[in-house]
Image (cartoon, helix red, strand yellow):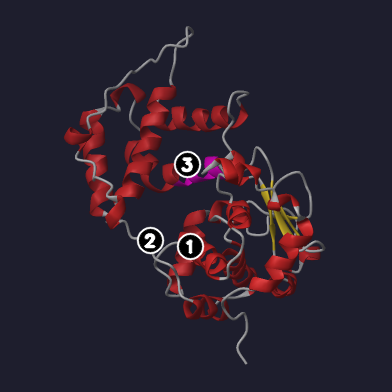
Amino acid sequence: MTFEARANNWLLEIASRNRNPVANSTVKTYRDALNTWILPRLGSLDLSAVNNKTVKPFVASLCTAKLSPAHTNKILTVVKMVVKSAVDENGDQLYPRTWNNTFLDTPVICHADQNTPVVTPEAITAAILGSQGRDRALYALLAGSGLRIAEALSLGVYDGGGNYWDPAEAKVVIRPGLAKTDAGAREIDLSPELNAFLIKHIQPTRVHGLIWPFDYTTMLRRMQRLGIQDGFHAFRRFRITHLRKSHVPSGLVQFWAGHSDSASVTDGYDKIKLDVETRKTEAARVGLGFELETA
């Protein structure tokens, strides 16, 4: 069996298994990593031949591409999971590996040195004005909601069984089972200004299926051509920073961001996420922190 054949089966298995099925957004992230980086280099190898020796030059190619240490290690983790997933009829691994990160020369992740840029309000406005149609809506939504890019690309309009934007209620719904984590299942309340902008540029009655039926790499290249080189997560950092600067209650910031509320016992008692009226009031109060249109 080739690595590519095993990888395709693995994606199907992790999405459909009963025990801890992987969210669709995460499966899409794995698929993008496979298609963009892994399969062109390792896909034709027999699975038994994917080991420290054959993966070492692959790691070197990722470093040559100047990917961040965190990104390089995430891609390598996908390779390791695919190999580990191959088991025999007894459930034992067919190709057990002891991966040697020193031999592979994988870059070390130094969290203190990680580049975690926050896009500026001016850059967000420029990206919106410099793009067309639904792309304008995507950048506004990312910066005005804090959605992860995989979550945004999984959205339909109204409730069709998946993640969706509800223009009538001015909210985005990320469903349980489709979220990256348990805390990721949530409702994100949108400011009236942002919701009206989305209606104008998405035209929800014309959407059939996904709002943005494109892959991550395509959307990233479009964004980079507009001058934003720091990745989609910079929009998410912008939104969370704006919420904190606007003194939004911490429990609501955690809820909208899809972060776990298990930091303390007190956090576990905070049920502001259940107060829909307060959520909508806060979403309107704090606004966006950037301009959607110029005068």
Q: Residue furthest top?
A: 90
> In the rendered image, which residue does mark 2 sit on?
116
Task: Identify the mark nearer the N-term, 1 or 3.
Answer: 3
Q: Quadrant of the C terminus?
A: bottom right
Residue 38 relative to residue 154: left or right: left
Which disc number belongs to residue 237? 1
Q: Quadrant of residue 18?
A: top right
166 inside magenta stretch:
no
Residue 9 image position (x, y, % from top left)? 51, 28
- Label pair 2/1, CB-CB below 8 angstroms: yes
User: What SS does tag 2 mark?
Assistant: loop
Residue 71 image position (x, y, % from top left)? 35, 49
Which disc number belongs to residue 30? 3
Task: Identify the mark nearer the N-term, 3 or 2.
Answer: 3
* Circle 2: residue type: Thr
- Label pair 3/2, CB-CB below 8 angstroms: no
Q: What secondary structure prevails in the magenta region?
A: helix
The answer to whether residue 213 shows anywhere in this view is no
Residue 44 image position (x, y, % from top left)? 36, 33
Which residue is depicted at the point 80% across and 61% down?
169
Which residue is depicted at the point 33% across and 42% down?
73
Q: Residues within 10 Å of mark 3 (few under 14, many from 20)?
A: some
Viewer-side label of 3, 2: 2
Task: Identify the mark nearer the N-term, 2 or 1.
Answer: 2
Q: Which residues are magenta?
A: 25-32
* Circle 1: residue type: Arg
- Marks 3/2: CA distance? 22 Å
- Marks 2/1: CA distance? 8 Å
- Marks 1/3: CA distance? 22 Å
Q: Residues within 10 Å of mark 2 (few under 14, many from 20)?
A: few
User: What SS does tag 3 mark?
Assistant: helix
* Circle 3: residue type: Tyr
